[in-house]
Image (cartoon, rainbow, N blue to C red):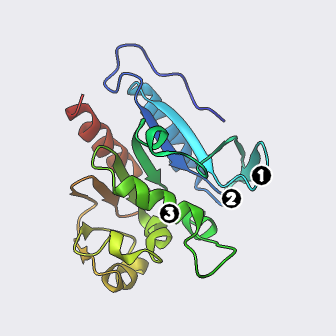
Amino acid sequence: MSGIEPRAGAALNGRKIAVLMESDYVEPEIFYYERRFAEAGAEVHFMTRLWGQPSITFTGHEWRVPFTVDRGFEGIGDRELRSYAAVIVPSGIVSDRLRYTDDVNRLAPATAFVRRALEEPSIVTGVICHGLWLMAAAPETMRGRKVVAHNNLVGDVRNMGAEYVDQDVVIDGNLITGRSVYHCHLFAHTIIGQLAETL
C-alpha cells in the first residue's frame, strides 16, 4: 500500500516518511499515520521484510483489517535511505515480529535498517510504545539517550543504557520516542513539527 498522495503546499512538501509494518499492527495508529503525514504533505511509504515476495498482506490486531505492503527495507543503499526524512517504528507487536532473525548471531534486517537511520543525522527516527523492542539487540543505539516507552519496557530501556523520561513524547537529537499507542497523535505531530523546521 503506497499511502495517500501528499496535499500540495502542505508543511512537508513531498518529503518521504517510512513506517515499518508487520502483522498485529494497531489499526487506528497506522491509519492515523497514513492520513496525517499525507495531510501534512509527506509521501508515506509502508515498509517490511518481504522475504523475497513482491508484497505481503498483514492483518491488524483488533479488527484483523488487511493491509498490503509492497516496499522492502532490505537492500536499500545509503543514498536511498537518505532520501527519507523520517523512519518510524510503530507500537504493538510489529517490532517483536520484525526483530526475528534467521541467524541469532546477526541483527534482524529491520534492526539493522533502523540503526542505519539513527546514524544519519538528517533522518528523524521515531519509535513509539513497544517499538523499542526492535532495538534491544543493538543497545548502543539507545545508550545515553533520553527516551520514553511503554511502562512494560522501562526495564529494557534501562538495560540498553538509555535514560527513561516520564513524558508522553521525548526528543533527543534525531530520535523521537512516544509513550504508547494512545499518544500516537502527539508523536506524529512532534515528528511533523521537527521535519517542518528543517525545510
Element marked by disc 2: loop
Element marked by disc 1: loop
Amino acid type for the residue under numbered disc 3:
Ala
Amino acid type for the residue under numbered disc 1:
Gly
Q: Is residue 177 above or below residue 81?
A: below
Q: Is residue 165 above or below residue 59?
A: below
Crowd tier of the residue under label 1, counting other residues whose Cα lies within 10 Å: few below 14, some 14–19, many 20 or above: few
2 or 1: mark nearer the eye: 1
Alpha carbon distance from label 2 to label 1 = 17 Å
2 or 3: mark nearer the eye: 3
Going 57% across and 75% down the picture, which residue do you hit?
A: 106
First of labels 2, 3 by sequence position: 2
First of labels 2, 1 by sequence position: 2
Alpha carbon distance from label 2 to label 3 = 20 Å
Going 66% across and 55% down the picture, which residue do you hit?
A: 49
Q: Nearer the viewer, residue 144 or 66?
A: 144
For residue 60, which quarter of the picture?
Answer: bottom right
Q: Is residue 96 left or right of residue 172?
A: right
Checking the image for residue 116, the label placed there is none
First of labels 3, 1 by sequence position: 1
Find disc 1 in the rendering and name its residue. Answer: 52
Checking the image for residue 23, the label placed there is 2
